[in-house]
Image (cartoon, rainbow, N blue to C red):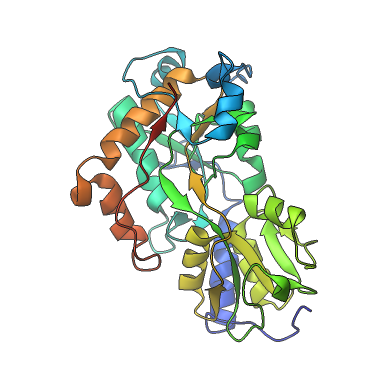
């Protein structure tokens, strides 16, 4: 059952204030890095069969991480971005270490933000030529289908269901869902110890889908726009735990030493850059960027970003996932 104690972790009121400040930041949009007014929303692009052409749908669901082969060639999507002079990126700004607003500088930082900057540098020659738009988990796909963003770089898991609606790059990070609870909790992982416990997830997340399929008797009625909202509810004692990707959970645990991950990841998942299904040239271009981003072994931009943002809280990763391509 949900606890009724006071604020957990982060030194009580001080920690709660920081959590609320980060959560509140999500409504402070548009997120133009340079403070310029955001341009009008671009005309929604039609959803086509795109990267699932030539009967590839069945194959995609056998190997959802397989994407289009990389290419530096320009096409309609690249031309559109160049004409606008900015890459419009859907991101998070309250996922610590991945995409969050540094309270000291006001700047967006994190592993995903570094990748957005690499894409902008390749297409536009300027890593700062980005308009960031903060979008909640449940709005990642609608934002792409409605043409509000060019890419979504927001810890988004590649899977067959999502491939019906959007296209993905090759995988840029391997992760898996895991349970996060207060220290001292009797919950031991994604197992029968969840029975009767109130477990929070982000709406539209793979964790929510997993719990709907198998909850072990947990109360899964609490869903929120973003993972940080689950942490706030956990600190308030309104829920007993949460389920999210361990890559995100590690960042939450780094923010609040009063919580920790239990059990093991109960699935293997991969993050990808999401794009509109009709933007095949952009998918190929992003895959080219990722090829360059991974290149160089321990000195690659990918490993540099990992050491900068994630290694302290998510140890043991020696290399990015290998890309997979369709025939």
Residue 302 picture location, percent across and down: 30, 47
Residue 237 picture location, percent across and down: 71, 78
Quadrant location of the C terminus?
top left
Residue at 48% x, 59% y is 247
From this view, report whether residue 131 is shown above or below residue 154: above
Residue 120 picture location, percent across and down: 35, 32
Asked whether residue 284 is in view, the answer is yes
Residue 119 picture location, percent across and down: 36, 33
From this view, report whether residue 281 is shown above or below residue 141: above
How many marks overall?
A: 0
Occupied quadrant, residue 172: top left
Residue at 43% x, 18% y is 281
Residue at 44% x, 54% y is 98
Q: Nearer the viewer, residue 213 or 25?
A: 213
Q: Nearer the viewer, residue 291 or 193?
A: 193
Quadrant location of the N terminus?
bottom right
Asked whether residue 128 is in view, the answer is no
Q: Nearer the viewer, residue 91 or 291?
A: 291
Tell me if 79 is positioned left or right of 121 in this view: right
């Amino acid at each position: 059952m949900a606890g009724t104690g006071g604020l957990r972790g982060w030194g009580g009121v001080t920690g709660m204030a920081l959590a609320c400040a980060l959560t509140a930041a999500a409504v402070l949009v548009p997120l133009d890095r340079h403070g310029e007014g955001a341009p009008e929303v671009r005309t929604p692009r039609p959803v086509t069969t795109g990267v699932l052409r030539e009967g590839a749908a069945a194959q995609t669901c056998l190997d959802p991480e397989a994407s289009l082969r990389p290419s530096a060639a320009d096409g309609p999507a690249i031309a559109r971005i160049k004409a606008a002079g900015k890459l419009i990126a859907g991101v998070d700004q309250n996922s610590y270490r991945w995409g969050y607003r540094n309270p000291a500088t006001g700047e967006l930082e994190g592993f995903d933000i570094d990748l957005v900057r690499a894409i902008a540098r390749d297409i536009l020659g300027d890593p700062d030529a980005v308009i960031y738009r903060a979008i909640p988990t449940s709005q990642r796909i609608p934002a792409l289908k409605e043409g509000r963003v060019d890419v979504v770089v927001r810890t988004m898991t590649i899977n067959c269901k999502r491939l019906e609606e959007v296209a993905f790059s090759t995988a840029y990070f391997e992760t898996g869902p895991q349970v996060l609870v207060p220290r001292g909790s009797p919950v031991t992982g994604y197992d029968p110890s969840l029975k009767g416990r109130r477990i929070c997830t982000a709406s539209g997340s793979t964790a929510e889908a997993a719990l709907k399929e198998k909850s072990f008797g947990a109360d899964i009625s609490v869903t929120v726009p973003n993972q940080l909202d689950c942490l706030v509810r956990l600190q308030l004692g309104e829920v007993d735990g949460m389920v999210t990707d361990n890559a995100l959970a590690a960042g939450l645990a780094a923010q609040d030493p009063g919580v920790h991950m239990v059990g093991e990841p109960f699935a293997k998942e991969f993050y990808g850059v999401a794009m509109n299904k009709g933007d095949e040239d952009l998918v190929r271009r992003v895959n080219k960027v990722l090829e360059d981003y991974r290149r160089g072994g321990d000195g690659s931009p990918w490993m540099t970003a990992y050491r900068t943002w994630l290694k302290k809280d998510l140890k043991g990763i020696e290399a990015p996932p290998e890309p997979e391509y369709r025939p």
